[in-house]
Each structure stands twice: as structure tokens, then as C-alpha cells.
Image (tube, grey):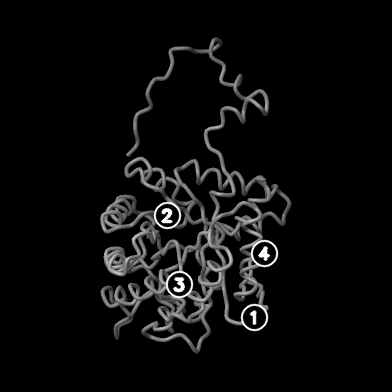
């Protein structure tokens, strides 16, 4: 996928001095190739049932689970900082979990209610809703399982279709299937079209790797204990593979995806770059919970400046080709960028 670098100039030192364009801050800003702004950042928000709740997540310092009323306060802060989108993730109570994940498409469910509240109060704010079953299943997997514990693809898709439609009916701007089932984009798109949701976008987690970086996220969702020692390697991708990611992207785009996701971001900058060069489509990248925690924990040692390394990290993701970045640092980074 690499392209040979064209010979740009016959000039050599001393007529060509690369440092000339680095000698002042103004010149460096004038020729900057990659710019990062709050509008490029998406804040993940964890939500819980109840009122007046702001629960600490010990594995994600500085991040909380919010009840719907506090969530609206959080959205207001994001808007004031210049952020225009958030992605919602629910922590579902144990009593509402089941083998068939029926709560996932409950029109009065937690996520559906939160979407409605956001769109009622902040109609122009972009809501991205996660389409996946792991918060809703009693076993913590992203789909319906058979008697051997294997995820049944097509039956899972049937539930995902209902879930995505419930999000669209609630007002979600972008439904984001993160489950990695085969063919789910096609059936979700068909059902959205049949129900006249022509402008509901699909952000497909097309290149989602089976990664060890997701631990704090699963803790925030409350799925670690249910999942136990099981893994998700029969549907999430092997992190050794590049061509597989490109095939997944190609399939999802042909099935009706508007946007594609690479997750996690930093270990896969090459994948982001390859997708951008090959497909020329908007790419979202997820700077995931483990990546956030590594920086947040390391910054306590004072061996580096947290602000500087966060901006460098997010800029590198954008430079690789990402149009937008989901990151737990979104709110903090937006303040630093303003």
C-alpha cells in the first residue's frame, strides 16, 4: 500500500535548509500540515439509570457514569468547549440483562431515553449510539450464543436491526454497530431505509481488533465479571492482520456504511493510513480506554507533561488519516486547544 515518494526538488544543502521553516512559532503554525480542533473530538459518555448520579469509574480516573439528568449537564459542558458530538454507552442493571438481550431494543430503555433527552434539549448536538449487545447479555458477549458458547451471527443480526431502529426512532444521528457480525451493516441499512430513516448515518466499527486495551471500558460497562475468562476472538479481528481490515472496510462500505471506525487507534495508525489512501472515506478512530489509562497513570509520575503528550497523541491519529477521534480526553483536550 506504500507509495514511492516523488522527488520534490533538486535543491540540496545549503540552498535548501529545512530548518528555515521551523525557526519561529509563527512560521511553524503557518506551514502546519495537520490541525486538531475540538470539532474533531468525540467524548464517550457512560450512562446509568437513576437521578443525580455521577459514579466514579476506578479504572478510568476522571471519567464517570452519569444518570440522564447529569448527562445533560455534561453535554452542555462539551458544547461550551466546542465539541459537537458524543458517543453513548450504557451500564445496564443486572436485572435487565438476558441471554437474548431484549432490553437492547426497549423503546423506554436507558439509551433510548438518553438519546431523546439530548435531542430534546440540544437538537443540533450529534448523538452517536452504540449498536452492540454486550451491555445487555448476561454472558457479556456481543451476540446471541449457542449451547457451545459460540456467537450465532444471523440471529444476532436480527437483534441488532431492532436495536439500531430503536435508536433511530429515539433520534440518534449516527448508529454505530460495534459487534463485528458479518452482514450486519447490510440488514441495518435495509431496515433503516424501509422505515424512512434515509439520513441516519451508519458508523461501522469495521476494523475492530481483539485487543487487550479494552479492559477499563469493560469495567465501565460492568461486563468483566459476566465475560470471565472468555474472549471475543471469533468475531473481533486478529491484530496481526492488515488485509483483513481492508476487506472488512470494503464490505461494510458496499453494504451501506457512511463512516468507518478503527479501534484501537494508536496500535493501528498504519491501518488508518491505508484505509484513507485506498478508500478515501471518512474514518473515525477510537483512542480507547487502555490508551487513556496509560497516559493518565503515567502522567502522575511527572516524567512528562500530560497536556503535551495528549495533544501529540491525538494529532498523530489525525495525521494518519482520521477525520474524528473518540477519546476520553476529548473534554480536557478541547480546553487545551481553545
Task: Report which residue position mark 2 lands on.
Answer: 262
Task: Report which residue position mark 4 lands on.
Answer: 62
Find numbered disc 3 in the image and state the secondary structure of the residue it sits on: helix
Q: Are dots 1 and 3 in contact, CB under 8 Å? A: no
- Using a 10 Å C-alpha cutoff, classify the residue at mark 3 as few (fewer than 14 neighbours), some (14 to 19) or many (20 or more): some
Q: Name which residue lies at 65% across and 72% down.
A: 70
Residue 170's tag is 3
Q: Are dots 3 and 4 in contact, CB under 8 Å? A: no
Q: Which of label 4 and label 1 is nearer to you?
A: 1
Residue 306's tag is none
- Mark 1 to mark 2 CA distance (whole Å): 34 Å
Q: Earlier in the sequence, mark 3 or mark 4?
A: 4
Task: Report which residue position mark 1 lands on.
Answer: 51
Q: Are dots 4 and 2 in contact, CB under 8 Å? A: no
Q: Earlier in the sequence, mark 3 or mark 2?
A: 3
Q: Which of label 3 and label 4 is nearer to you?
A: 3
- Mark 3 to mark 2 CA distance (whole Å): 26 Å
- Mark 1 to mark 3 CA distance (whole Å): 20 Å
Q: Is residue 308 above or below residue 45?
A: above
Amino acid at each position: 500500500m506504500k507509495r514511492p515518494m516523488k522527488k520534490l526538488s533538486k535543491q540540496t544543502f545549503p540552498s535548501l535548509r529545512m530548518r528555515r521553516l521551523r525557526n519561529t512559532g509563527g512560521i511553524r503554525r503557518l506551514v502546519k500540515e495537520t490541525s486538531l480542533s475540538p470539532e474533531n473530538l468525540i467524548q464517550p459518555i457512560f450512562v446509568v439509570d437513576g437521578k443525580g448520579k455521577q459514579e466514579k469509574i476506578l479504572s478510568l480516573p476522571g471519567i464517570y457514569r452519569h444518570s440522564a439528568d447529569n448527562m445533560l449537564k455534561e453535554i452542555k459542558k462539551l458544547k461550551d468547549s466546542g465539541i459537537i458530538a458524543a458517543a453513548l454507552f450504557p451500564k445496564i442493571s443486572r436485572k435487565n440483562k438476558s441471554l437474548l438481550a431484549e432490553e437492547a431494543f426497549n423503546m423506554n430503555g436507558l439509551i433510548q431515553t438518553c438519546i431523546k433527552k439530548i435531542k430534546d434539549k440540544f437538537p443540533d448536538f450529534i448523538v452517536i449510539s452504540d449498536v452492540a449487545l454486550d451491555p445487555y447479555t448476561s454472558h457479556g458477549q456481543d451476540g446471541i450464543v449457542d449451547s457451545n458458547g459460540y456467537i450465532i451471527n444471523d440471529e444476532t443480526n436480527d437483534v441488532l436491526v431492532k436495536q439500531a431502529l430503536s435508536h433511530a426512532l429515539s433520534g440518534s444521528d449516527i448508529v454505530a454497530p460495534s459487534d463485528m457480525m458479518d452482514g450486519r451493516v447490510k440488514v441495518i441499512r435495509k431496515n433503516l431505509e424501509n422505515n424512512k430513516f434515509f439520513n441516519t448515518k451508519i458508523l461501522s466499527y469495521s476494523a475492530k481488533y481483539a485487543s487487550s486495551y479494552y479492559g477499563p471500558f469493560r469495567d465501565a460497562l460492568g461486563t468483566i465479571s459476566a465475560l470471565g475468562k472468555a474472549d471475543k476472538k471469533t468475531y473481533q479481528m486478529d491484530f496481526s492482520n492488515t488485509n483483513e481490515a481492508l476487506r472488512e472496510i470494503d464490505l461494510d462500505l458496499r453494504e451501506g456504511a457512511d463512516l468507518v471506525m478503527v479501534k484501537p487507534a494508536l496500535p493501528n495508525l498504519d491501518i488508518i493510513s491505508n484505509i484513507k489512501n485506498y478508500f478515501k472515506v471518512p474514518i473515525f478512530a477510537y483512542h480507547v480506554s487502555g490508551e487513556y489509562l496509560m497516559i493518565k497513570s503515567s502522567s502522575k509520575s511527572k516524567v512528562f507533561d500530560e497536556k503535551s503528550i495528549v495533544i501529540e497523541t491525538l494529532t498523530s491519529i489525525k495525521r494518519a488519516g482520521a477525520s474524528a477521534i473518540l477519546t476520553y480526553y476529548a473534554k480536557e483536550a478541547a480546553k487545551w486547544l481553545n
